[in-house]
């Protein structure tokens, strides 16, 4: 048991967010299965308050890129604080988001803040952010396990995603996750993880 826990840590410790994607295609069946893995996450009252929109259509990806870059441009030119921009410097990010067109798939995760049943009656969902956050974590794990890379992208504000993908009123965009292979010469920032001592207290 100790060995499997160690092995799993070694494996997941290799997961990194990536911004430079190759345009090499990824089979739809892989994407379908990573979404199924995400759906195994626990959720408040098992309501499963998530929707995963998988986009490979170049036209739709282009529209998403244009709308995202418009918002991001505003973000990097005034909306984000000086401190925020400073914190992001090591990652070299800016308003340009070419990966939104280049990555073969974009998985747009929506949270369902309530549900409408077949009779038009509204029902509550519970712990929606926690549930959809967990499912997104499962999704990133499954993507890594499949041998692919992803970026947890949060264009801000991201209401445009609901419009571009014609989502119903009970759904709000949660994360935009490009998925694919890394570009040949892709690099990642030189980051470290906090130590066990820094992140845990034992009682
Ligand atoms: N949404 C912007 C800014 C950004 C914010 C955080 I916090 C990051 O960890 C990375 C980027 C962008 O995607 O560039």
Image (cartoon, grey):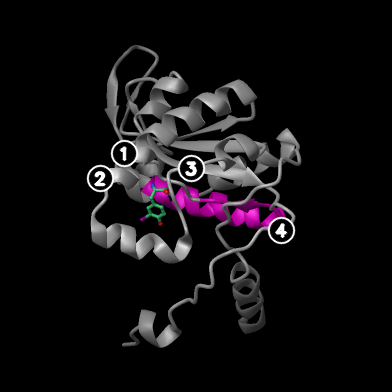
Which numbered disc flags the more N-terminal residue, 3 or 1?
1
Q: CA distance from mark 1 to mark 2?
A: 6 Å
Specify the quadrant that holds the C terminus. Answer: bottom left
The answer to which of 176 and 123 lies nearer the viewer is: 176
Q: Which mark is residue 74?
A: 1
Element marked by disc 4: loop
In the image, is 162 to the left or to the right of 142? left
Which numbered disc flags the more N-terminal residue, 4 or 1?
1
Span of residues in magenta:
131-151
Q: CA distance from mark 4 to mark 2?
A: 32 Å
Which numbered disc flags the more N-terminal residue, 4 or 2?
2
Circle 3 is placed at which residue position? 96
Does residue 167 appear in this view?
A: no
Element marked by disc 3: loop
The answer to which of 166 and 87 lies nearer the viewer is: 87
Q: Which mark is residue 185?
A: 4
Q: Check the image and report above or below for 102 versus 94.
A: above
Circle 2 is placed at which residue position? 78
Pointer 4 residue Cβ closer than 8 Å to ligand 1: no
Tags 1 and 2 in contact by the CB under 8 Å rule? yes
Q: Position of residue 141 (x, y in %)?
A: 58, 57
Q: Position of residue 192 (x, y in %)?
A: 49, 77
Q: CA distance from mark 4 to mark 1?
A: 29 Å
Tags 4 and 2 in contact by the CB under 8 Å rule? no
């Amino acid at each position: 048991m100790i060995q499997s826990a160690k092995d799993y840590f070694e494996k997941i410790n290799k997961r990194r967010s990536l911004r430079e994607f190759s345009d090499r295609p990824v089979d739809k069946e892989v994407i379908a299965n990573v979404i199924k893995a995400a759906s195994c996450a626990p959720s408040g009252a098992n309501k499963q308050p998530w929707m995963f929109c998988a986009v490979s259509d170049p036209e739709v990806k282009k529209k998403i890129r244009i709308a995202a870059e418009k918002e991001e441009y505003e973000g990097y030119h005034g909306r984000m604080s000086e401190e925020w921009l400073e914190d992001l410097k090591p990652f070299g990010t800016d308003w340009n988001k070419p990966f939104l067109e280049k990555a073969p798939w974009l998985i747009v995760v929506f949270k369902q803040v309530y549900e409408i049943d077949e009779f038009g009656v509204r029902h509550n969902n519970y712990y929606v952010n926690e549930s959809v956050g967990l499912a997104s974590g499962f999704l990133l794990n499954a993507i890594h396990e499949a041998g692919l890379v992803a970026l947890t992208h949060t264009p801000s504000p991201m209401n445009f995603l609901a419009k571009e993908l014609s989502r119903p009123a009970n759904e709000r965009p949660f994360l935009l996750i490009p998925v694919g292979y890394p570009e040949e010469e892709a690099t990642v920032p030189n980051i470290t993880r906090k130590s066990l001592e820094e992140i845990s207290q034992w009682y």
